[in-house]
Image (spheres, rainbow, N blue to C red):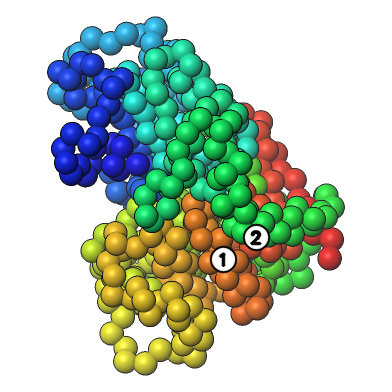
Amino acid sequence: MNVLAGNYIAEPPTSRKYPIINDFSRKDQIGFLDFRESSGLDKVHLSARYESYSYKGKLEMADDCNSVKNYITGKNNYNRMHEESNEDFIHEIMDLFNLGHLQSKWISSLSNGQMRRARIAKALMDKPKLLLIDDPFLGLDPVSTLSVSNSLRVVAQELDTCVVLGLRIQDEIPDWVNHLAFVTENGTEILGERKEVEKRIMDISKPIISKHKAHNSHHQSESWVKKEMIEASDPIIEFKNACVAYKGQTVLKNLDWKIQRGSKWRILGNNGTGKTTLLSLITADHPQSWRSVVTINGVTRKTGSGVTYFDVNDKIGISSPELHALVPPRMTMMSIITNGLVRGIGNANFSFKFKEKELGPHAVKLLKHFESEIKKNENKRFHELTVSLQKLTLFLRAVIKSPDILILDEAFSCMDDEELVIKCHEFIKSELGSTTILTIGHLDWEVPETDFTLKLLGDENRGYEYYERIK
């Protein structure tokens, strides 16, 4: 995808051509979005997403340069604030990607899935001839995935834009895609019209697809029963009639949730229903987590209780897209992993190195389990690792501290190496039996085995459903 985007020099220079581009005076005719990388926004602490509401108060967000609409149109750049814009085209694109109702929100307050839709819309503002998107459906719930796919169909068929998607072999190919290219480490192996080459690609990929189907069918064969409430005799986390709202918007409404110590939970919900917000209340990244909305280990968290943000996070391990975006690109794999052992710095601080000479037994066992992956890559810088190894690195960093609570927010999404995903899941099942685990993931096969599910419903009218796995 980087080659197509023109990010690498072609040798010879004439070997790469763009027949569909005929106006070389425009520099914006190729758009490239890589959702495997950071969000595309400034790298800020997760708390900033929620503190923004307090900062903005009652100001009208439509007048703010950091609103969703201004981000998409480029008017969050002060040098472009007075440029003329085609309002009809702006509304067409925003409606196409279901962003019209979000146009006045502060851009950093969007959920991960909403942010990805906004980035696609922003890329289309310049009306590129070629739009390249690597992992376009990463982090999207099933409803949003279908919606974005249909929107990209319109872009390809009606807006005179050639769309190229980068997908994993396990991913479903949208039915509107009419050409396929099969790429390996050696380059492009197969290229042509879909009807002519799809079977050849499927034949070559059969071992990978067979393993994926077996792995996926294991998850889909699980049976669940709906419950009024999941009781807990020894809750490590408890929400009692918890409510969180800001700027007139209800995020949590009358949430009752008890999490048994050592239980495994999956948190489900469409983009924007508050999944990451809920986790941020547990990790104390959300300012309102100090307003007696959550109880941890029997102690209600509130200001003046003597418990600090760092005390809270010493007992929590986390892997998330927000943390992924904060990792220093030149930091080595092993330095990142052992950074998880440094206490008193929070989970978002990568500045400190672990200086102890000896690791504890849990850390030694963990590193031994993943020895083959670590030994070959421990001195590689983060930006030199594949996405699968980057995800593994953050997972190991979260687990190595032997946390009481492990949060896996899309921890295994976008991993190409499904065997590595399975290896991580097996370690969780065999070695983390006493750890309380909370998982967010839209694809079943990316989520480790869980005991219970909390499903968040609605956008305006919040609701919650509880499910227990039948063993």
Classed neighbour count for the residue bearing mark 1: other residues with Cα under 10 Å, few (<14), some (14–19), many (≥20): some
Q: State the residue at coordinates (36%, 28%).
A: 131
Q: Is residue 100 visible from the viewing direction of this image? A: no
Q: Which residue is mark 1?
A: 419
Number of marks in picture = 2
Left or right: 425 as drawn, with respect to 83: right
Question: Which labelled disc corresponds to residue 214?
Answer: none
Q: Quadrant of the N terminus?
A: top left
Quick check: 246 above or below 23?
below
Q: State the residue at coordinates (35%, 9%).
A: 87
Left or right: 92 as drawn, with respect to 301: left
User: What is the secondary structure assignment of the residue under circle 2?
Assistant: helix
- Front residue of 413 and 294: 413
Percent of width and height locating residue 214 = 71, 59
Labels 1 and 2: the sequence-earlier one: 2
Which amino acid is tagged 1? Glu
Q: Is residue 15 visible from the viewing direction of this image? A: yes
Q: Which residue is mark 2?
A: 211
Q: Verify CB contact (< 8 Å) between mark 1 and mark 2.
A: yes
